[in-house]
Image (tube, helix red, strand yellow):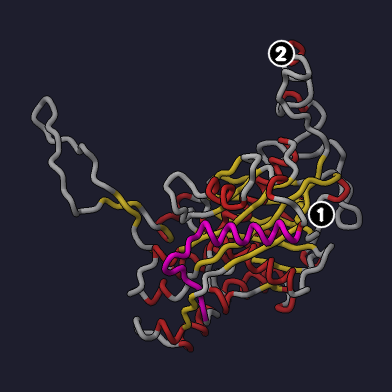
């Protein structure tokens, strides 16, 4: 098992206990400004830096920066699939699905719709809310497990947005935990790399990997995209307080979509020098449909997610009663209810739009956040405990402030 945990920003007035100014981020989630030259490229204190002129050195100065969430956006496919629609193709009904999952509808990509287009639309809306131009974006993080290109979709989003400055864009693959990892990555780029505006996009089209004859899994998933603009700010305005991230590869057996060889189009294999048949050329491969042990995933989520949130709250100097909203990956209403109960968060403080969209993987948190912000439910200054969990297995949480 691997884990990463962290504490951000020297001080957050009225929200946390005072932290020594020497604390920030390193690989484990913290950095110390004292003696930082040994761990992070900082000013001219690194070895050999004295040989470079100011104009020659491209190493960014690390200053005490914070980061905040200033814009949200989302987009969903036009085609809606209701529980009644699913009842026409598998042995199920609306009551059976809604009672067990809380889901009533989901959106599915069809025809010429693309995930890149959805992600770009969500990103544009986030930029518009933040009043930031595409050319002012320094980095695009596309959190997805279903890219439309083997080599990643993020650069296509950068192109679709019309970012003429060619900002860096890359994919993050961590399934339903992807958006939380994207937020933490954005914060690290801002704090350690001098970036100003970072787009974090969660987008997935799991409908393409669903076995639509399996009523245990096809009822759960939908397609969507959500985006947040994370912006650099002064440390006293910092809006990402702490995080807690984990993975456990042993849990792959409970939730996966593994690569498998195609049996069609068999090719003649070459023979080795000793007459043995080599597995060359290799067969073309593709990914299987989603395989999930629902009971084990439920047990994992209700055990690990509350622990992760409590750990992040402790690092932020907060308690469960200090948060305004609990925002979980929208996987199953029973999971949301169980986690909220263990954290003693009342139902009215839990953000949920699961009924309308189902499980949209990395898109679920930013999609729900965008709707909550635009409806006026989440207001500037509100503190949110967010957590993602899913295949890998991976899980993580972040304590943040909106606006």
User: Gap in Å between the C-alphas at discs 2 and 1?
Assistant: 39 Å
Does residue 16 sit above or below 85 in this rendering? above
Locate residue 350, reporting x and y percent: 70, 73
What secondary structure is the magenta-colored segment mainly? helix
- Find the residue positioned furthest to the right: 14
Does 124 appear in magenta? Answer: yes
Quarter the C terminus occupies: bottom right
Does residue 330 sit above or below 238 in this rendering? below
* Range drawn in magenta: 105-129
Q: Which residue is mark 2?
A: 48
Q: Which residue is mark 1?
A: 317
Residue 17 visible to an observer of this rendering: yes
Q: Taking 389 as reference, is 58 left or right?
A: right
Q: Taking 310 as reference, is 154 left or right?
A: left
Does residue 50 sit above or below 310 in this rendering? above
Indicate the quadrant where residue 84 lies: bottom left
Residue 389 visible to an observer of this rendering: no
Locate residue 104, reporting x and y percent: 52, 82
Locate residue 112, reporting x and y percent: 44, 65
Q: Taking 302 as reference, is 110 left or right?
A: left
Locate residue 99, reporting x and y percent: 52, 84
Label 2: how many residues lie within 10 Å, few (<14), some (14-19) or many (20+)? few
Residue at image position (72%, 40%) is: 195
Residue at image position (78%, 52%) is: 68
Does 222 appear in magenta? Answer: no
Indicate the quadrant where residue 380 lies: bottom right
Q: Taking 253 as reference, is 264 left or right?
A: left
For label 2, the SS is loop
Residue at image position (41%, 73%) is: 218
Residue at image position (72%, 62%) is: 385
């Amino acid at each position: 098992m691997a884990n990463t945990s962290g504490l951000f920003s020297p001080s957050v007035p009225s929200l946390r206990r005072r932290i020594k100014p020497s604390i920030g981020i390193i690989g484990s989630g913290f950095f110390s400004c004292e003696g930082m030259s040994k761990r992070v490229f900082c000013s001219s204190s690194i070895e050999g830096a004295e040989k470079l002129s100011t104009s020659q050195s491209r190493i960014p100065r690390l200053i005490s920066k914070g980061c905040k969430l200033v814009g949200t956006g989302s987009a969903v496919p036009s085609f809606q699939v209701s529980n009644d629609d699913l009842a026409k193709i598998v042995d199920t009904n609306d009551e059976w699905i809604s009672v067990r999952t809380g889901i009533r509808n989901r959106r599915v990509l069809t025809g010429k719709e693309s995930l890149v287009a959805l992600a770009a639309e969500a990103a544009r809306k986030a930029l518009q809310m933040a009043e930031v131009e595409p050319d002012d974006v320094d980095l695009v993080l596309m959190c997805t497990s279903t890219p439309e290109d083997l080599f990643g979709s993020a650069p296509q989003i950068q192109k679709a947005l019309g970012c003429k400055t060619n900002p860096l864009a890359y994919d993050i693959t961590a399934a339903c935990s992807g958006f939380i990892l994207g937020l933490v990555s954005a914060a690290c780029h801002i704090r350690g790399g001098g970036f100003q505006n970072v787009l974090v996009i969660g987008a997935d089209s799991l409908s393409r990997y669903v076995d639509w004859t399996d009523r245990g899994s096809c009822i759960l998933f939908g397609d969507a995209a959500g985006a947040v603009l994370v912006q650099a700010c002064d440390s006293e305005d910092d809006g990402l307080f702490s995080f807690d991230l984990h993975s456990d590869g042993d849990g792959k057996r409970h939730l996966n979509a593994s690569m498998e060889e195609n049996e069609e189009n068999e090719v003649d294999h070459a023979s080795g020098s000793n007459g043995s048949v080599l597995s060359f050329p290799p067969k073309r491969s593709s990914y299987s449909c989603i395989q999930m042990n629902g009971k084990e995933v439920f047990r994992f989520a209700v055990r690990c997610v509350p622990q992760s949130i409590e750990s992040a709250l402790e690092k932020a100097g907060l308690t469960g009663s200090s948060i305004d909203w609990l925002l979980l990956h929208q996987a199953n209403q029973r999971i949301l209810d169980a986690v909220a109960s263990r954290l003693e968060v009342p139902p009215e403080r839990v953000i949920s739009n699961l009924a309308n969209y189902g499980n949209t993987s990395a898109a679920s948190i930013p999609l729900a956040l965008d709707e909550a912000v635009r409806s006026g439910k989440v207001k500037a200054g509100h503190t949110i405990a967010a957590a993602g969990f899913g295949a890998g297995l991976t899980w993580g949480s972040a304590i943040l402030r909106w606006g």
